[in-house]
Amino acid sequence: MSHNDSRIKLTVQKQIVCVSILILAGKLAAFFLTNSVGILTDALESIVNVVTGFLSVISISVALKPHDANHPFGHGKVESLSASVEGFLILLAGIMIIIEAVKRFFVPSPIEDLGVGIFIVGIGGLLNYILGWYSIYTGKKHNSMALKAGGKHLQSDTYSTIGLVIGLLLLWITKISWLDSVIAIILGIIIIYTGYKILKETTAHLMDETDFKAIKKLADILWKNKTSNWVEIHNLRMLKYGNVYHVDCDLVVPWYINVQEAHNESEILQNIVRSQYPEQMDFTIHMDACIEALCHQCGKENCTHRQYPYTDEDTWTVENITSMYSVHNNNL
C-alpha cells in the first residue's frame, strides 16, 4: 500500500464528512418543519455520521504515520479503534431514538408539513447511499476498515430511510399519530443492530482474532508455490494492522544447505506472498533444519541424505500450518 493510496483514503473521508454535514442540515430542517420523531431518528443518525466521519479523518491521519520506536507495528490499529467508536455511537443513537419514540407514543405531538419533510428525507437517503457506496468501494480498494465501516453505516442509514419514507407516507395518508412512534422504534432497532455488527467486527480486529479465511488463502498460496526446499511450514501467524499484514512463521528447510541458501528461500517465500497481496507485507521467518522424521513428506529429488523413502506430502491446511507443533518439534 503506497503513501499515495493512504492520502486518497483521507481525501475521500473528508469529502464524505462535508456532504454528511449538508445532509444533516437538511434533516434537521425537516424535523423542525414537521416535528416528526421519525424524522428526528434520521437526523440523530446523521449527527452520528458527521461525528464518526470526523473520527475517521483523524484515525486515517494517524494511521498514515510510519512505525516508530513506540509503535513498531505502525499505527494501523487506530482505524479499528475508530470503527469501534462508530459502532458504539450508532448503538447509543439507536437507544436514544427508541427512548424518544416511546415517550412520543404516550404523549403524541402534532405533525406538520409532512410532504416537505418526506421529500427532504428522501433526498438525504439517496445521497447517503451514494456516499456509502463510494466509501465502501474506496475502503475495499485501499484496504481501510474505517471507510468500509463508515460506508456500511451510511448504506444502512439509506435502508432505514426507505422504511421511514414508507412509514411517513402512511402517516400522511392515515393521519394516525402513533404511527410516527412505531416507525421510530423499528428504525431504532435496525440502527442498534447495525452498531452491533460493526462493533463485533472491529472488536475481533482489536483483539487480534484469527481470520481463518485470510489464513486459508495464504496457506493455498504457499502450497501451490512451494519450492523443493520447503519441507514444512508451521506456527504461522497473520495479523492485519491498518494496511499492513504481519506474517510470522517457521520454515523448515534441508539441514545441509548453507545460511545464504536458507536466506534465499525466505526471500522467495516473501516475494511470492507479496505478489499476491496489494497490502504491505511484513515478515518474520524463523528457519528450522529438517530431521529424519520429515523424510516421508519431503519431495526433494536426489537428496543424498534421505533416511526414509518419500511417500506423500501433507497438504498445508489452516490447521497444520498454524499449529505451534509439528513433526519437527515433536522429534526434537
Image: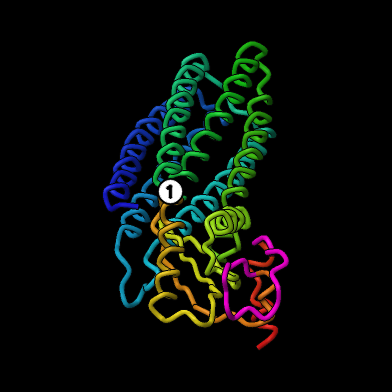
Q: As drawn, which residue projects farthest toward the bottom?
A: 332
Query: As displayed, is residue 232 above or below residue 103?
Result: below
Determine whether, in the image, residue 320 is placed left or right of residue 92: right
Residue at 54 percent across and 68 percent down: it is 230
Whole-percent x, y for residue 2 in the image: 30, 52
Residue at 36 percent across and 36 percent down: it is 21
Whole-percent x, y for residue 233 in the image: 58, 69
Whole-percent x, y for residue 42 in the image: 52, 33
Q: Which residues are magenta?
A: 298-317
Query: As displayed, is residue 93 above or below residue 312?
Result: above
Determine whether, in the image, residue 6 is placed left or right of residue 237: left
Residue 303 lies in the magenta-colored region: yes
Q: Residues within 10 Å of mark 1 (few under 14, many from 20)?
A: many
Amino acid bearing label 1 = Asn
In this figure, which residue is indicated by the disc labeled 1?
A: 143
Q: As drawn, which residue projects farthest toward the right?
A: 311
Q: Quadrant of residue 27?
A: top left
Which quarter of the rendering shows the C terminus? Answer: bottom right
Whole-percent x, y for residue 179 in the image: 68, 24
**Residue nearest the viewer, comparing 26 with 12:** 12
